[in-house]
Image (tube, rainbow, N blue to C red):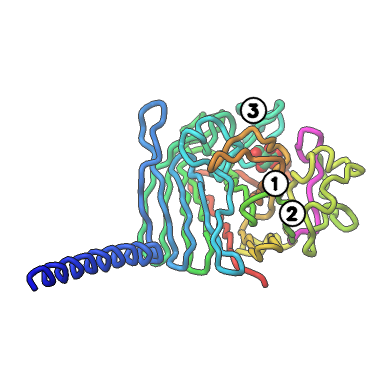
Amino acid sequence: MKNRTFQGFLSLLSCSVILFACQQTGGKKEESKKPGIEKSGFGTLPDGRAVDIYTLRNGQGMEVKITNFGGTIVSWTAPDRNGKYEDVVLGCDSLAGYLRGVPYFGAIIGRYGNRIARGKFSLDGVQYSLATNNIGNHLHGGIVGFDKVLWTATPVAGDEPALKLAYLSKDGEEGYPGNLNVEVVYTLQKDNALKIDYTATTDKKTIVNLTNHSYFNLAGKGDILNHQLVLNAGVFLRVDSTLIPTGEPRPVAGTVFDFTKPTGIGMRINDKTDAQIRFGLGYDHCWVLSDSSKTLKSAAILSEPASGRVMEVLTTEPAIQFYSGNFLDGKVIGKGGAAYQYRSGLCLETEHFPDSPNRPEFPSTVLKPGDTYRTTTVYRFSVRN
Ligand code: BGC
């Protein structure tokens, strides 16, 4: 009898342990469904400064991880048509991976997204010389651009969690004039969209053109050639062999640059009869949005037929650089030890036109003291059956 009671006690105990464990797991699951933001360590810079990584959850299942090193989006999960989540951006598992050198994976780009010819420009008759880091031109802010600096992060909790990142770019940094105070706010919305608000102020006339350099692959693997793309742009900028715009915008109609209707990226990407494809080694050009207003408007729609994932890009900017990952060559090792192959990710960088500081006919990228640079870009995910 006694023994029975003892056994009964034991089985009751084991049931309670199981129940407790189940509640704990259930609890964890519940936690991951709740909207919020969580901070963890991501490593240490060679100078000893600690780097963090923040996980933003929107309560619907989407999760975005952002580090304050370069303001970099490290991972971003999005559901397919069956509700299966996959990481849709290229990146590295650890800070060490980024420090070994990556082609701007997921980072904030500044002070100037894309190229400035020979790294030279003038403001009010004063010539400035910037660091040249791309066959004699200035690319993505120079040798130590905003993608390689440590930003000050402030998490903002809430139903739509946000991460505020601040950076002071000192007068003379990479050759740019003026102390530039930059703030970038990433907000993960309930509608599966990540909103990026960029603001900047200066104490001396300068130039600014900020963007984000995420490489997307909506299938989560393989190359991006089966992705379909729409670009709401009737013209693009011709470039020279060093990818500097040469002048008059060229209409896309009748060319391999026409993405006004959903078109497979791989369909015409190797059409070397077009010199522009030869110069870019594929697509690496700036499309001028047909709607030139500064309101938030649709710039691009990217979709991947097998998974059904769709990503729309909305922006207040006048242009979008579509870069098809032509310089990826399997040498950069990313998440899970993956060697990122040729065209395994693509970038849709909303911005002002490359080399605007040397092109008075392009929309201005000049920022004056007393004015605030302000732009917004939204990447919104959905599915198509
Ligand atoms: C540029 C490419 C460049 C790449 C670097 C893109 O924004 O347009 O020419 O190679 O960034 O990863």
Is mark 2 in CB contact (under 8 Å) with mark 1?
yes
Q: Position of residue 375 (x, y in %)?
A: 56, 55
Badge 3 crowding class, 10 Å Cα cut-off, few under 14, some 14 to 19, many 20 or more, is some
Q: Which mark is residue 288?
A: 2
The quarter of the rendered structure image containing the N terminus is: bottom left
Q: Amino acid at mark 2?
A: Val
Q: Earlier in the sequence, mark 3 or mark 2?
A: 3
**Viewer-side residue, 70 vs 183:** 70
Q: Nearer the viewer, mark 1 or mark 3?
A: 3
On the rendered structure, is 344 left or right of 372?
Answer: right
> Residue drawn at (64%, 32%), measured in percent from left and top?
331
Q: Nearer the viewer, mark 3 or mark 2?
A: 3
The structure residue drawn at horizontal position 61% and vertical position 34%, both measured from the top left corner, is 332
Q: Position of residue 93 (x, y in %)?
A: 49, 41
Left or right, 190 with reference to 109: left
Q: Residues within 10 Å of mark 2 (few under 14, many from 20)?
A: many
Q: Residue 233: where, in percent of width, then height?
A: 76, 59
> Which residue in the structure is indicated by mark 1?
353
Q: Is residue 100 above or below residue 74?
A: above
Spatial CA span between label 1 and label 3:
19 Å
Q: Disc 3 and disc 2: Cα gap in Å? A: 25 Å
Viewer-nearest residue: 15 or 103? 15
Q: Residue at x 61, y 59 (%)?
A: 316
Q: Quadrant of the C terminus?
A: bottom right
Highlighted range, magenta: 232-245
